[in-house]
Image (cartoon, rainbow, N blue to C red):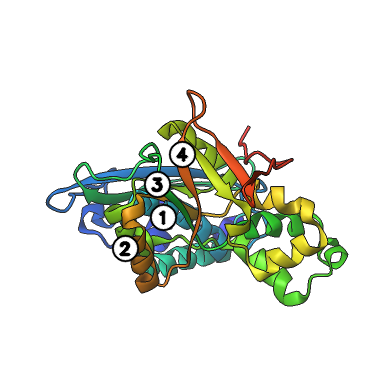
Amino acid sequence: MAGDRPHEFALIRRYFAPLASDPGALGLTDDAATLTPSPGCELVLTKDLLAADVHFFSHDPAEAIAAKALRVNLSDLAAKGARPRGYLLGLALPQDWTAEWLEAFCAGLARDQASFGITLLGGDTIASGGKLLLSVTAIGEVPVGLAVRRNGARAGDLIYVTGTLGDSALGVRLRYEPDLAARLGLDAACTDYLLDRYLLPQPRCGLADAVLAHASAAMDISDGLTGDGGHMAAASGVDLHIDIDAIPLSPAAQAVLARDPARLATCLGGGDDYELLVAVPADRAGLLEADARAAGVALACIGKAVSAEASTGVLRYFRKGASFPLAGDGGFRHF
């Protein structure tokens, strides 16, 4: 009930101050925090804004919404080779929020803070006047001048991705089409796996050190391999030649494609993977693979960078050496 809700400052003390363990946050008792980088390091900052029924469903568990908001930013930090330090949270609550919902939301943040070694530094909470909106600004650090960019891929580099692609894009289709699992003949295990991959992305923070040590370019795959691979190619001025058959797909995604091969475009362009796309010089590829094994992060080589045929690089798909035009989704777009 609205009458049971604490006012703004009591809300901060009750729910958010326990998450702010960094001394620079001052227990969220001031208007700003301070953060000093480790010696020889510089800060890396990234922000994602998430809206109910755009990036998650309004009725998703509060813990999962909190975790997703934090994890999509941690994925960006990992792609830079950055170690997480802290984050700022902007939260616009709908009119029907409850204390129970906010308790669960903060519990989700607390669990991920402990898992990923990050702490709340500050933020703001308001009434949205509509649906739930939240924004996380994540802050990490890397040695000065060594942040890995998307524009460093060079001809001859090998192209890698972590994890499996397409699961989240298929999971969201299952949410929008409740009868789709039955139409595709998916069993409960496959269905639950795809739904979970959409609900809870897995940022590859364990690979950040290896990215920093070996990669010439990297970015997280939030808008699909088709879209984000195209961004890396264009920024780097090289073409990315991707072997369709080398792209890692989960058993659940393979089961979907066995029934409906046309959904490959959704897998590669639908977005929300939050895996890493990494370009690495060929002579360092073995070191990257060894570090990934040691970190327990699945890694697959899916292609190579070659000299661009035009002034701006593009991503091209191939199968058995022949060009493989992929009809359909060209990457997630926010507008």
Which residue occupies the foreground of this view, 246 or 231? 246
- Which amino acid does the dot numbered 4 rest on? Val
Residue 74: which disc?
1
Is 65 placed left or right of 130 in the picture?
A: left
Per the image, label 3 sits on a secondary structure element best described as loop
Residue denoted by label 2: 287
Q: Nearer the viewer, mark 2 or mark 4?
A: 4
Residue denoted by label 3: 157
At label 3, counting other C-alpha atoms closer than 10 Å, the crowd grade (few under 14, some 14-19, many 20 or more) is: many
Is 145 placed left or right of 168 in the picture?
A: left
Q: Which residue of the protein is positioned furthest toward the left in this rendering?
A: 39
**Residue drawn at 83 percent across, 64 percent down:** 184
Pick whichever of labels 2 and 4 is earlier in the sequence. 2
- Which amino acid does the dot numbered 1 rest on? Leu
Per the image, label 1 sits on a secondary structure element best described as helix
Say whether marks 2 and 3 touch (CB < 8 Å).
no
Q: Which residue of the protein is positioned furthest toward the top in this rendering?
A: 311
Residue denoted by label 4: 306
